[in-house]
């Protein structure tokens, strides 16, 4: 069996990258300006409610809601994040250092790795399968592999949301990543529009494709593992036919071949 | 939208399995416990827990030898994983598959909710406020979600895809689903799937904060049930494409509630969708299921909702029980731990009892199996539901 499907659209979201169009302009050499106090602003929740959620959840929600119009209500969703809820973890760990060891209940239920996926399913009223993947620096390859398997084997469109935010002090020293960054793809078993790009993927062991653009290099240097999807996004942005090799663990990799619409 | 019937066209045989829980560390101990209906729950002696409760602790794990070449990965979760590898020669079974198919054709999917976070808890609690973490603490080897899969991959020398599924208490049931997909997709010829979660202060104090921890050994389905008992464990299955006789994964169903982070909707619609999808996927009728392993956490709301859904989906005749009175709620490991116990029960012809049950909740309409019974059957359905309204049902079969 060959894993194959169609990529119906992509989203990129982060500081100074508000939309797919903005990302495409950056690939073409537009100037990137990132502000340190940038905050993700999902629209699917009232802002007061959103403010109570972690930066990781808000980032994932903002990416998910932008790709959602390309997906049916019963789509599957794959949320992939290496670090998950670092901020909430830190708050809980600090609470466990106090004599009372009292954990806030809402903090605890939002500490799980699938907090973002759960909040997204609640905000959007989704009832299909949601899978949450982690794979350290290879989270992008692992997440894409899972999404591609689900598209093919369940004959079901899948929203893939890749997201990671910097860890708070003191965890940041142990897992340094300098920029919040998210990407999302709408993937389906059959072409949904004239702009859907066919793809197939096979396991390989080749070297991972490096970014081709200057902005791609910059994003990869932030050490955010989500930036490892940039070579794939570059291919989608330019509409070219080509192959991108995404890394997996153990020396394995995934060759993703993008064809013509 | 339906899932395809690929599982039935391409049987996924479970060629080896292992489980390590508070009941014991090998198959024989779990056979004995399933036959006797004994509980492994005991008064919590896990260090620094600021309230009284019962836990399903794997005792002595901290004194086990840990492979020195992999000492960077030494934490409680990986110690449980190591115990799972040595249990019933599971590591040898994996080595056999690597020799047969090649290391690049063997994959690994692990479900965990907290990974090796207990080492990070200790690091936080031993530092002065605002100090950095100790230089020797490695996030990648301990609290990173991939830390258990990374250890297993290094130790077993698996070179195929390896990743972690973390959807709270459904994590390792979904890891088994993904393992099947890696084989169906032709990416792997054999996949080690499973779940590992250790006791840790975050889980214990977190569930306590939600007022969900019982002061007694938990009593699923009991009229006086008042919360869960947390457990720990490791369980692995080795999946292969193989049509010969034995136990197999014959169906799976996944869904979301889209309702609340920690409470299911009253109608249990999400749980029902997962169970119906799993049944359809396995091409079985409701009456084909011989035993239902409830998620059965022993919280007042969860058991009532789940039993109502089971009665509606599979009828009120099929025996059901929760294994959590025996092993506790092993959280991210629960899906795999309980799937392995279901496999043992299938092979041994045991309908497991509902350990801890004294007086059945009269609102529960299911045929709760209060004590273990001897009975041959061919298919069981095992539920795992997690925070975020994340549901997964597996159908396990014996040919």
Image (spheres, coloured by chain):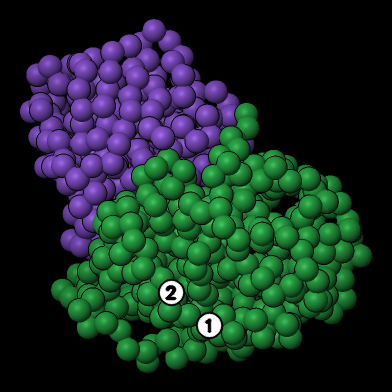
For the N terminus of chain B, the quadrant is top right
Q: Position of residue A255 (x, y in %)?
A: 24, 35
Locate residue B101: give its quadrant. bottom left
Q: Which mark is residue B90?
A: 2
Q: Residue at x 22, y 83 (%)?
A: B68
Q: Confirm whether residue A35 shows in the render.
A: no
Q: Chain of mark 2?
A: B
Tag 2 secondary structure: helix
What is chain B's hue in the picture? green
Q: Residue at x 41, y 56 (%)?
A: B190
Q: Residue at x 28, y 41 (%)?
A: A203
Q: Residue at x 49, y 89 (%)?
A: B59
Q: Position of residue B37 (x, y in %)?
A: 73, 82
Q: Confirm whether residue B268 shows in the render.
A: yes
Q: Earlier in the sequence, mark 2 or mark 1?
A: 1
Binning the other alpha carbons within 10 Å of mark 1 as few (below 14), some (14 to 19) or many (20 upward) gives some
Q: Residue furthest front?
A: B244
Tag 1 secondary structure: loop
Chain in purple on the image: A
Q: Position of residue A176 (x, y in %)?
A: 18, 54
* Left or right: B83 in relation to A109: left
Q: Which residue is label 1 attached to?
A: B26
Question: With respect to residue A36, does B85 lie above or below?
Answer: below
């Amino acid at each position: 069996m060959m894993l194959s499907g169609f990529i119906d659209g992509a989203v990129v979201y982060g500081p100074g990258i508000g939309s797919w169009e903005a990302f495409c302009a950056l690939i073409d050499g537009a100037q990137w300006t990132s502000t340190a106090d940038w905050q993700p602003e999902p629209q699917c929740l009232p802002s007061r409610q959103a403010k109570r959620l972690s930066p990781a959840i808000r980032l994932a929600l903002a990416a998910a809601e932008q790709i959602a119009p390309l997906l049916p209500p019963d789509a599957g969703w794959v949320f992939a994040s290496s670090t998950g809820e670092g901020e909430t973890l830190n708050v809980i760990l600090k609470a466990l250092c106090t004599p009372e060891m009292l954990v806030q209940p809402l903090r605890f239920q939002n500490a799980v790795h699938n907090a973002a996926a759960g909040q997204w399913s609640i905000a959007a009223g989704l009832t299909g399968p949601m899978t949450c993947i982690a794979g350290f620096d290879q989270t992008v390859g692992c997440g894409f592999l899972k999404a591609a398997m689900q598209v093919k084997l369940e004959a079901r469109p899948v929203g893939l949301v890749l997201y990671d935010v910097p860890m708070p002090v003191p965890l940041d020293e142990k897992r340094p990543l300098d920029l919040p960054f998210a990407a999302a793809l709408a993937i389906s078993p059959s072409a949904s529009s004239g702009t859907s790009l066919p793809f197939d993927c096979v396991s390989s062991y080749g070297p991972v494709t490096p970014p081709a653009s200057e902005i791609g290099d910059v994003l990869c240097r932030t050490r955010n593992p989500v930036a490892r999807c940039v070579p794939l996004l570059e291919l989608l942005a330019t509409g070219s036919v080509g192959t991108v090799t995404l890394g997996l663990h153990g020396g394995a990799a995934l060759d993703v071949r993008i064809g013509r619409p | 939208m339906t899932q395809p019937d690929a599982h039935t066209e391409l049987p996924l045989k479970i060629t080896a399995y292992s489980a390590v829980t508070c009941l014991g560390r090998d198959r024989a101990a779990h056979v004995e416990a399933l036959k006797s209906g004994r509980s492994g729950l005991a008064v919590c002696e896990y260090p620094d827990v600021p309230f009284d409760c019962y836990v399903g602790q794997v005792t002595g794990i901290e004194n086990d030898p840990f492979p020195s070449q992999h000492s960077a990965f030494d934490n409680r979760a990986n110690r449980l994983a190591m115990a799972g590898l040595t249990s019933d020669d599971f590591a040898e079974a994996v080595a056999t598959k690597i020799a047969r198919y090649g290391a690049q054709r063997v994959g690994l999917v692990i479900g965990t909710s907290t990974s090796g976070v207990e080492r990070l808890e200790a690091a936080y609690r031993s530092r002065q406020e605002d100090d950095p973490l100790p230089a020797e603490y490695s996030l990648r080897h301990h609290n990173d979600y991939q830390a258990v899969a990374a250890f297993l991959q290094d130790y077993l020398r698996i070179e195929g895809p390896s990743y972690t599924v973390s959807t709270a208490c459904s994590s390792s049931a979904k890891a088994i689903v993904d393992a099947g997909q890696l084989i169906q997709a032709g990416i792997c010829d054999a996949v080690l799937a499973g779940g590992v979660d250790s006791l840790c202060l975050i889980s214990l104090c977190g569930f306590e904060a939600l007022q969900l921890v019982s002061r007694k050994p938990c009593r699923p389905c009991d009229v006086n049930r008042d919360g869960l008992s947390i457990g720990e464990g490791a369980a692995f299955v080795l999946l292969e494409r193989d049509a010969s006789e034995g136990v197999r994964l014959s169906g799976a169903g996944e869904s979301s509630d889209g309702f609340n982070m920690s409470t299911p909707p009253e109608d249990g619609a999400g749980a029902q969708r997962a169970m119906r999808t799993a049944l359809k996927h396995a091409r079985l009728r409701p009456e084909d299921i011989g035993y239902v392993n409830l998620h059965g956490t022993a919280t007042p709301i969860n058991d009532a909702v789940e039993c109502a859904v089971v009665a509606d989906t599979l009828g009120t005749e099929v025996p059901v029980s929760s294994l959590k009175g025996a092993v506790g709620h092993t959280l991210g490991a629960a899906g795999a731990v309980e799937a392995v116990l279901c496999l043992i029960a299938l092979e041994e012809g045991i309908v497991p009892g509902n350990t801890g049950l004294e007086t059945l909740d009269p609102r529960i309409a299911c045929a709760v199996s209060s004590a273990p019974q001897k009975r041959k059957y061919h298919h069981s359905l095992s539920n795992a539901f997690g925070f975020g309204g994340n549901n997964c049902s597996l159908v396990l079969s014996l040919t």
